[in-house]
Amino acid sequence: MHSGGGGFSLSKLTSVLKKKTQSDFDRVISGTSKTREKLSYMDEILGLWRLEDLDDTLDDLEETLLSVDFGPKTAGKVLDTIRELVEDGKIKTGEDCKRALKETIVNILVNDGGDPTKMNVSDDEKIPTCVLIIGVNGGGKTTTIGKLSNWYKNAGAKVMMVPGDTFRAAAAEQLQTWADRTGAIMSKSPPNTKPGAVSYKAVDEAIAMGDIDVILADTSGRLHTNLDLMDELVGVKSSIKKREPSMPHEVLLVLDGTTGLNMLNQAREFGQQLGVTGIILTKLDGTARGGAVISVVDEMKIPVKFVGVGETMEDLQVFEPLSFVDALFPEEAGDA
């Protein structure tokens, strides 16, 4: 069963997730350059570290975090931790402070988000893994599905794409292009079918085919304030569940990195209605607002699973908190 994709399995998927290469890290480094540039002001602040100026230093650090769209709540939480560590005598120098800052941010990403390298998969080999992709239009959803299809293919999976965005005229054609590029197949979607019915039929078709490993279901993405859209998405999820109660195994929310803290409102709306299991952060390379993702994880307790750091298919990277924070706060030559 499921041999069509070259032997897709959870262990294969896990090894693909955990395999970090230098080129992956280089992509994350180049993709976070604008945020890193703004944060580099911290090195100046910490270079002048004096315990007696602690309040001023913390104010300056807070201002720097806010400048890259850390939310006030998350920035405050990070700096409260720093103050405690100073008072406990665990931070004595600027280098100590930078190290502690990085550790505190990594802890938020790991403890609140959980392990981003765990993708939920079907535990029944007769049932494909279903990934529902949601998010507002313009955030890079269709492109992300294409990149995700490529990523699953590299893990040995045979992928089916579902054109569930029936609202946007060119959505299905765009998806077909990505299917052709990544060797995925498209579900047979009759025209003028409602999104819930499209998704139900696709799941039915995938199970009947017997060799589909992963279903990637696209959805409509009119503004998150649009109640009709939320009702429609809840309906799509229910239709999928009606055909196969274990589905969807993942509900991934695509967030546009260039929107900064606005993504927090989107994450709240979608999270409340749809039980989001993970976040894909796109367009990170085009923004200096990369701090927002830390606030989303802090407030929503949902892991970031992937980041998009460029245009090519390989530029969808598995999110690795330590690498991400290292990219934002690189060690200077003089740092320990």
Image: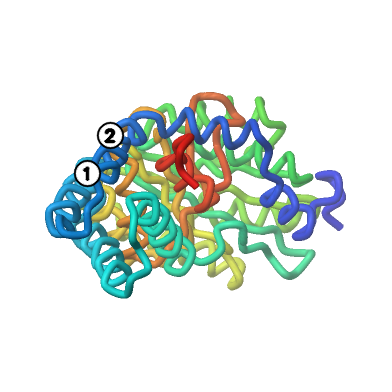
Q: Are marks 2 and 1 in contact (CB under 8 Å)?
A: yes
How crowded is the residue under tag 2: few (<14 C-alpha within 10 Å), some, or many (20+)? some
What secondary structure is found at the residue carrying circle 1? helix
- At label 1, counting other C-alpha atoms closer than 10 Å, the crowd grade (few under 14, some 14-19, many 20 or more) is some
| Left or right: 288, with 197 as reference point | left
Q: Image height check: is 4 above or below 102?
A: above
Q: Which of 16 and 19 is in front in this view?
A: 19
196 or 318, which is in the foreground?
Answer: 318
Q: Which of 139 and 311 is in front in this view?
A: 311
**Where is residue 198 drawn, in percent x and y?**
52, 49
Q: Please give the name of the residue rendered at 58% of the width and 37% of the height, measured from the top-left corner.
A: 25
Residue 123 seen: yes
Image coordinates of residue 286 in percent, x first then y, are: 35, 28
Residue at the image point whose x is 46% and y is 66% from the top: 238
Question: Which residue is label 2 attached to?
Answer: 38
Q: In this view, does 12 lie above or below 144?
A: below
What residue is pinned by disc 1?
Answer: 64
Residue 94 placed where, x, y %? 33, 50
Which residue is located at x 54 percent, y 68 percent? 241
Is residue 193 found left or right of 48 in the rendered image?
right
- Image quarter where the N terminus lies is bottom right
Left or right: where 325 falls relative to 183? left
Q: Which colour scheme is used?
A: rainbow
Query: Could you tell me the amino acid type at mark 2?
Result: Lys
Q: Where is residue 30 in the image (x, y as percent from the top left)?
A: 48, 28
Q: What element carries label 2?
A: helix
Q: Can residue 193 be seen in this view?
A: no
Disc 2 to disc 1, C-alpha distance: 7 Å
Mark 1 residue type: Thr
Most foreground residue, 268 or 240: 268
Q: Could you tell me which residue is drawn at 34 percent across and 65 percent down?
A: 300
User: Which picture quadrant has residue 131?
Assistant: bottom right
